Image: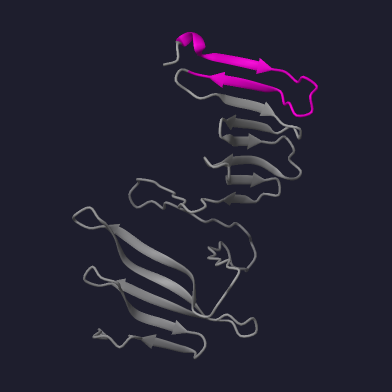
Amino acid sequence: IMADSDKIITITPNTSVATTHPEIKFVGKDNSPMYLRVLDDNTLSFEGVEGQVFAMSPTLSSGDIFSVNDISGIQSMVVNADGTITIDAQTKSTTIKNNASNTATLILSNNNADAVDGPILEFFRDTASPADEDHMGSLVFTGRDDAGNKQEYGRITMHNDDASAASNGGELVFKLTEANSDEQEYLRLRASSRQIEFNTVQDDIDLVWNS
């Protein structure tokens, strides 16, 4: 166990060596060292023993002015000088949470005065090998059951029914979970045949019209 006397802040100035950056080293009780370094491009880099964790740049005209890396050193969040904000969770998920009742967890706002669409929520399937019947994205509705298990209750999925550049088309599919089993398709909008199709898989589903 590290003694109190081992908790240190060490300042190392520029030593006129090309590979050396001025740094401040922080060591707390039972902690691995954390370094604050000034890199060659004047970026303030917060680094642990596994590499850079957080960085800020004073150059506001180009490049990244704010950056956070994950434990493997891969950039997880970045704010670019051009206004672009990127979050990359790699193989994990990005979660936005609140605990208020009847209050939006996420709001997309656009204040343009033109008649063009906005705000826009875009699902971009950025694959290098697009093919017919690829799934372009889904809205998935989940919740807990009375045993505390996370369950899916329904989804809306966009299919690419034609990946050809000259004849792209989509199919929008609506599914519901039935009896705790796989989703049952109830409705499909087909662009290629210009159809609205009910009960695509010809299951035992009734269509009720109440006047």
Front residue of this view, candidates 42 and 40: 40
Residue 168, x across and y down, in percent? 59, 82
Q: Is residue 25 magenta?
A: yes
Residue 196, x across and y down, in percent? 42, 87
For residue 184, above or below residue 65: below
Residue appearing at x 59%, y 67% in the figure: 117
For residue 202, above or below residue 95: below
Residue 184 visible (yes or no): yes
Front residue of this view, candidates 180 and 51: 51
Residue 10, x across and y down, in percent? 62, 15
Residue appearing at x 61%, y 69% in the figure: 128
Q: Is residue 191 left or right of residue 204?
A: right
Q: Is residue 181 left or right of residue 71?
A: left
Front residue of this view, candidates 185 and 129: 129
Asked which colour scheme the image uses, the reply is one colour
Residue 211 visible (yes or no): no
Count of marks, rendered view: 0
- Quarter of the image containing the N terminus? top left
Residue appearing at x 76%, y 32% in the figure: 40
The image quadrant that residue 81 belongs to is top right
Q: Is residue 108 magenta?
A: no
- Quarter of the image containing the C terminus? bottom left
The image quadrant that residue 24 belongs to is top right
Residue lying at the far bottom in this picture: please name it.
193
Residue appearing at x 44%, y 20% in the figure: 30
Residue lying at the far top in this picture: please name it.
5
The image quadrant that residue 131 belongs to is bottom right
| Magenta stretch bounds | 4-28
Residue 62, x across and y down, in percent? 75, 45
